[in-house]
Amino acid sequence: MPTVSVCCITYNHEKFLAQAIESVLMQETDFAVELVLGEDCSTDSTRQIALDFQRRYPDRIRLLLPENNLGVMGNFLATLKACTGTYIALLEGDDYWTSPHKLQRQVDILERHASCTTCIHDAEEFMDDNSIPPRLFSQKYSSILPGHEHEFTQADIALKGWFIPTASMLFRRSALFPIPEWVDHAFSGDYSLHLLLTRTGNIYYLPEVMSRYRLHPGGIMSATQNERIIARNKKQIFETAHYKQMVDARHHGRFNEFLEGLHFDQSKRLKATGQIWSSYYSYYKAISAVSASRTIVHLKQLVYQLVKGAPPKAQ
């Protein structure tokens, strides 16, 4: 039984996967580490690269090779569930670790801090084509990530949103499993994990840069992908409703505001595709998401627009 299982998912990462794998193999630890690699039917040479490494390191690398493409969340959850270590570290196939002491440092921290389920650290974000200068997460989220060691609670995650580099995460397997079934249908595996892992403990932050987070040009959905964004919004609405169930009621306001924005956007996009009644329903869900007083404000605006003869428009 390994002490740490590294959960790595990869798809069309032929340019980057070797660097990711080597950053795992270079780890200097006094415990056993396994790399569990989920290769999701890439259309390039990613699978062959994974197989070549597995042949060279059969005692350290375990491959998951599905016959059909599972998609990001399907591949992530299948790979995550295959991890058997006491601790699980996350690393996507296009990111990599920069410190050979990363895993040892994080396991030592969690061994000393029983109140924490997770350990994270600072990371560098960089654009793959060098079109923008690299920057640290502690610079990007300077109001959240301090220059010293710190513990984050679930309330911090609820109020501050996403600020944790995925490749910085190492957590206790026992804090996550069994994974709730609703996560299978979530949009954001990262943020879902952040809230799930803080159900029973805190997140310990180390202000040390020990990984690099790769951005790809053109990764943002274009405005012409309306149907794809409608599907994304549906998943985000679904997962946000479950997020509310996990956190204290004092923090529901933040998620209600997020739901309001999602429903407004969904209403606009559904109308553009001719789904008028679904559009009206989403509009109704939007204006009733936050509070009774907010609903009244929206209804007054709606009446005003109807009187003027203009169709209601999403905010």
Image: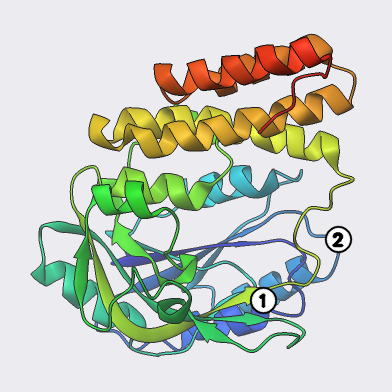
Circle 1 residue: 17
- For mark 1, give the secondary structure: helix
Q: Is residue 183 visible?
A: no
Tags 2 and 1 touching, CB below 8 Å: no
Residue drawn at the location 73% of the way across and 75% of the way down: 49
Q: Secondary structure at mark 2?
A: loop
Return the x and y of residue 113 as percentages of the image width and height.
Answer: 11, 66
Looking at the rendered structure, the number of numbered marks drawn on it comes to 2
Name the residue at 75% across, 20% down: 312
- Dot label at residue 43: 2
Mark 1: few/some/many CA within 10 Å (<14, 14-19, 20+): many
Choose the circle earlier in sequence order: 2 or 1: 1
Identify residue type, mark 1: Leu
Q: Position of residue 247 (x, y in %)?
A: 28, 36
Question: What is the x, y in percent for residue 89?
Answer: 40, 65
- Towards the viewer: 28 or 74: 74
Q: CA distance from mark 2 to mark 1?
A: 14 Å
Camera-side residue of 205 and 172: 205
Give the percent coordinates (x, y) of residue 177. 32, 41
- On screen, 81 above or below 212? above
Evaluate whether residue 117 shows in this view. Answer: yes
114 and 62: which is toward the camera: 114
Q: Which image quadrant for residue 86? A: bottom left
Q: Is residue 90 left or right of residue 159?
A: right
From the viewer's perspective, is residue 275 above or below residue 171? above
In the image, taking residue 170 as reference, residue 286 lies left or right, namely right
Image position of 10 (left or right of 241):
right
What residue is shown at x 42% (from left), y 53% (from top)? 161
Q: Residue at x 33, y 78 (%)?
A: 103
Query: Which kind of residue does numbered mark 2 sit on?
Result: Thr
Q: Quadrant of the C terminus?
A: top right
